[in-house]
Image (spheres, rainbow, N blue to C red):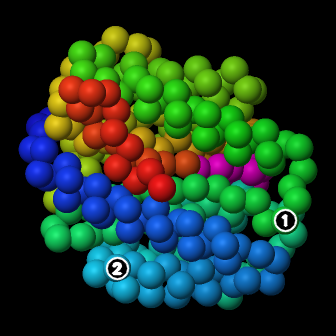
Amino acid sequence: MSIICKSQSELAAMREAGKIVAGTLQALRELIAPGVTTRALDKAAERYIRDCGGTPAFKGYRGFPASICVSVNETVVHGIPGKRTLSKGDIVSIDVGVVYEGYVADAATTEAVGPVDGEASRLMNATSSALAAGIEKAVEGNHLSDVSNAIQMKVEAEGFSVVREYVGHGIGRSMHEDPAIPNFGQPGKGPLLAPGMVLALEPMVNVGTWQTEVQRDGWTVLTKDRKLSAHYEHTVAVTKNGPWVLTAT
Ligand code: MG
């Protein structure tokens, strides 16, 4: 494993990519409503990213056909935008990656479509709090698995389960760099975090079993029990001054 540390100017460039990601997610939040197709979200995202001078990082990645992933309800991640319309009570996860001047930033959010039931809103709160707990541990001198463990503890304290087969990742000039970052594990293991490391932290959290399966399209990941799943992600730099969330609004 080789973790590429970024210089101050590289982090500044990644922050510019991160601002476009944040702006895209904000624009999509305003569009999410019952009756909107997932394809409409994709088109709006691509337009926003290109208008900012960026490139959608996911489009064409290993053949992925769209600019964003849109994952509704029991879809964990990698949902392909299409004809599906959002319905009142759905939860929808949007994952966006942007390349800007050679650097990539990656973030995701889960949003409610109109009012949702208590379980769905507890799931979303637990997942975003777990991400925040992981970010807090992304500091110089911690071990990588301190981040993983903080995420898992937060999720399991709420009675939900952490997906095992998909993990966070280092990020920089490539969308996926070392290290792989599981959202579970014992603390105190793995590499020591150092300034300049950039981590895409992304808990994927299920109401029921952590197990998943991939649909026949080769992309769409569903919960095995078809219960709800949520996904939040930020691109986070480890700095001398603590974690810097490069995809913050
Ligand atoms: Mg990611």
Residue 228 shown in magenta? yes
User: Residue at the spot x=20%, y=53% of the render?
Assistant: 12
Task: Determine the residue located farthest toward the top in the rendered image.
Answer: 188
Q: Provide residue 22's location: percent of width, then percent of height.
A: 46, 61
Q: Is residue 170 above or below residue 187?
A: below
Q: Which residue is mark 1?
A: 114
Q: Which residue is mark 2?
A: 52
User: Residue at the spot x=42%, y=65% of the render?
Assistant: 21
Q: Is residue 45 visible?
A: yes
Say which quadrant the N terminus sits in. Answer: top left
User: Residue at the spot x=57%, y=32% of the render?
Assistant: 130
Q: Is residue 48 above or below residue 19?
A: below
Q: Provide residue 26's location: percent of width, then percent of height.
A: 56, 66
Q: Amino acid at mark 1?
A: Gly
Q: Is residue 219 visible?
A: no
Q: Is residue 125 above or below residue 46?
A: above
Element assignment for label 1: loop
Residue 119 shown in magenta? no
Q: Is mark 2 within 8 Å of ligand 1?
A: no
